[in-house]
Image (cartoon, helix red, strand yellow):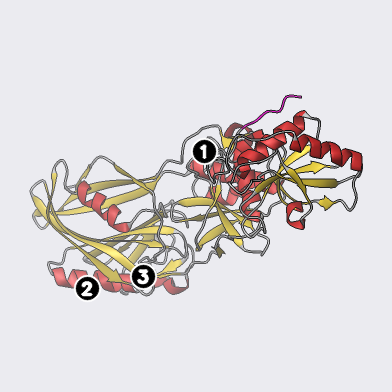
Amino acid sequence: MRGQVFYLRLFRFAASSFFALTLLALALLPAGVHAEDADASNYHGVDFTIAHPAGWKTSSSDSGSHVSGSLSAEGPCDHLILSWIRDPGMDPGDILDQIEKAYDSEEVKVLSSERGEIRMKEQTAKTLNLAYEFNGYRSVKLFAVWNSSRSDRLFLASFSSCNDSDNGNLALFEELAASFVDLGNRDLTKLGPKPLDGAWPQVLGDLLSSYHYKEIRTLPGRTVHVKVGFELSPQNGTYVLDSQEELWTDPPEMAAARAGAVAQILQQAGYEARLVQRGGEIAVAVLDPSKKWQQVSINPASPERMVGVLANGTWEALMYSDGEDLAEDNGIVEGFDLDKLIQKDCEPSRYVELKALAETNQSWLDGLREVLESYDYDKYYEENVFDCSNTAQICWSVLRQKGYDARLMMSYKGHPLDPHMWVGLRYPYESNGYVAVETANTDEKKRLVHLGRVVTDAAYFKGIMYNSSAQFSRMHPEEGMRLRPRI
């Protein structure tokens, strides 16, 4: 009499965080090859290995690959199934929660469940010991779930046995798990920590803020699917209950497309950029001036006004030289069109070291000072209310209306004037010559006086330059005034 197979509905759940642990697996052998006919410890087809009892037969799914697949290892009375997928960034305990729910729905009932852990060579797996009933028949199933940072995969192992010894089954399962080794034949690249000083982080952030995503929403959480099938097989005049799980995740197409687009923007701007992935997160790595890789998150809180943000922290990730390799490792078949994903809003800022003038035309300088001294504010200087960012943009607007080639200048962390903003004027009688204007001038009562004053301190001749208030406001809306000079 043939066994009866029953399948329950799918269970889907989202992942948002990422982890870096490794655990149990088996050396993958081609379908139909027996372990006793091959040296499992030397088989590196999917970069992991495990020791198992002599005589056990192992076979892999036809789709078995580094990215996803399953392996069956079967003894006379015991059956181990191992599945792996690209790490979706979900805690193994959450996956066990959903597996338990799948065993406690419709015609299936959980009789008892017990959680635990298995210490492995390099990390810990979370486990579930489950007794369940289906159609009047009972069985026990053991599960272990873990993340492996070495290969950025998540593994699900399930174990069943016709042996009635609960302690013996658990001991065997733990012994199998303890022998697992993730070979991790992929290069991991260290990212971070984020540089705190210098103009580089600010200029990079401005470049990322000069574009926005046309589909203005944050990235969706990764989705993991679980399907459980149950089988009643005739044996010795009765039926034996067994089950099998299937685990998969949807390809992160949107994240991969965004990362590829941001990497392309950075490369076009002269940066050295790569794609990286770890624990459900795809990002861009960019090389900083000290030759350290920094992470650019492509999931900013405000995708309507920026395409990425320089992230902080230190972590390791798999690095890809191009988008095709990353797409292949995630089961993604469609490419992306940069113009359909991203829109450019303005030119980015730039770091400059301006040429200070030894001498200037006195008539021109007197005319500039007359303009600066002919305006007064009816305001007091107050930090974060009306301060140098306001006075600099107002001064810039007035000077542009008067025909001066004015630019906004901003300091950065580590700059002698930080935090500060002022105006730089191109000198019309000498190529690349500039004059600096301090705009936040106050009396003893903090009352702002005049539009500005000419300064010669060397600190005013290096900084981050913005062409207009509208450009600055687009990248720094919290400080911007979006002034448009009318000549």
Q: Earlier in the sequence, mark 3 or mark 2?
A: 3
Q: Residue at x 66, y 58 (%)?
A: 415
For the residues marked 3 and 2, what is the alpha-carbon distance in whole angstroms?
Answer: 18 Å
Magenta stretch, residue numbers = 482-487
How many angstroms separate mark 1 from mark 2 (CA)?
51 Å
Looking at numbered disc 3 in the image, what kind of residue is underneath it? Gln
Label 3: which secondary element: loop
Query: What secondary structure do most residues of the magenta stretch adopt?
Result: loop
- Left or right for 205, reference 150: right
Tell me, yes or no, whether the two marked residues, 1 and 2, touch with CB atoms within 8 Å: no
Q: Residue at (10%, 51%) from the top-left corner?
A: 137
Which amino acid lies under the numbered mark 2 shown in the image of this protein? Ala
Say which of 330 and 161 sits in front.
Answer: 330
Give the CA separation, mark 1 to mark 3.
36 Å
Q: Which mark is residue 303?
A: 1
Q: What element does badge 1 sit on?
A: loop
Q: For residue 177, what is the image quadrant?
A: bottom left
- Whether residue 289 sits left or right of residue 381 in the image: it is right
Give the labeled residue for mark 3: 123
Viewer-side residue, 427 vs 7: 427
Taking 35 as reference, is 324 above or below it? above
Does the magenta portion include 59? no
